[in-house]
Amino acid sequence: MKRAILKDVKSMVTESVEPAPCPSDGLVVKVKACGVCATDVKIYNYGHHLLKLPRVLGHEVAGVIAEVGEQVIDRFKVGARVAVCAVVNCGECIYCQRAVPSMCEGLEAFGYHYDGGYQEFMVVPNKAIRCGGVNVLGDRISFAEASIAELLACAINGQHLSDLQLGQSVLIIGSGPVGILHAQLARARGASAVFLADIDPQKLEMAQKICGPGLTGTIHNSNEHEFLDHVSGITGGHGFDQVLLCCSVAGVQRMSLECVAKMGCVNFFGGLPKGHSMVELDTNQIHYKQCRVVGTHGSSALENRLALQMIDRGLIQVKSLITDTIEVEQLEDALQMNERNTKRLKCVVAFSD
């Protein structure tokens, strides 16, 4: 089989190897599609403290079950179309017991602790099965669309943590794939107004086309003062009930407290680079507005299943997000931080029969 394996930072090799054997209590999935995540881009270019190299990256995986271990033969069938949740939680720690698996003290993930989806055949251990991480696909969803479910699952987790309510106004800063998914999800949850903001007018134009009438409007935020005036004008000086930050910019985190309404919520959905995460905030904004500031990290198998169902039923449109479909030999180029790649929305590695 072919696989792309990261040997070192900025050093990836495409090679042919024998597939790993199927565990007696696990599965082997023939990968059909694996989404290229911004996290993979960061790992390729900068490494990650949880990652021991060499490793096959890729955690947005959909495919077909190729082998079933004898201990789980009653639960799965060869040929079943499935998506594999990225995260593998222990099910036993205090956070798993509190039904917050994304905070699991023993959290593992494909592409970190287990070889991921940038290979033709991927082993799924029993631990991933036990936490509900193998989800059978509906008939209407393609493999490429199913690979986007991981990103949507994170958005579902984020909006749950923000407690986004029917009729609230929403500002999403950052109009990349996750911002677009947040916009669609917020409208599906009954938001009264959904605005996307970005410094790149071309990205905003593309986001508007994908979201269609579900997006109330866009805000070009090239100048902080003008941006805040625009927010004030749109909201009648009240601010937005929900502010979701889908970009890794420290200044935006600071500015977000001026954009949120009284009793509203700011969600730091996008983390900041290591060594650049200290941000000076006006905490009086939080105090006097009685607003909340929350963070979002990852998702769960349940949220992954909900995401797949929403895509399958046409509640969230993801096909237009996929701007590039590539072969595994082209992966390293897609992970490099060059100008051409920053113009992409979502890139998917596809394996043919």
Image: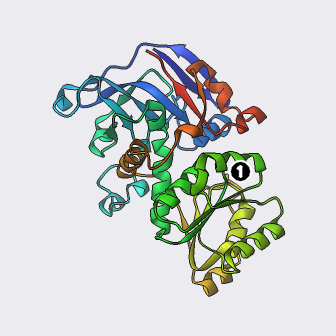
Residue extending farthest to the front is 213
Residue 54 visible from this viewpoint = no
Q: Residue visible at 50% across and 72% down?
A: 167
Left or right of 263? Residue 256 is right
Q: Residue visible at 51% across and 46% down?
A: 151
Left or right of 295? Residue 235 is right
For disc 1, the marked residue is 204
> Disc 1 marks which amino acid?
Leu
Residue 243: image quadrant is bottom right
Residue 57: x, y in percent? 52, 32
Residue 100: x, y in percent? 38, 60
Q: Residue visible at 82% across and 68% down?
A: 226
Q: Is residue 350 above or below residue 150?
A: above
Left or right of 130? Residue 244 is right
Residue 315: x, y in percent? 44, 50
Q: Nearer the viewer, residue 208 or 346?
A: 208
Mark 1 residue crowding within 10 angstroms, few (<14) / some (14–19) / many (20+): many
Q: Residue visible at 19% across and 34% down?
A: 75
Q: Nearer the viewer, residue 43 or 332?
A: 332
Residue 119: x, y in percent? 48, 23
Q: Is residue 27 above or below residue 163?
A: above
Q: Quadrant of the N terminus?
A: top left
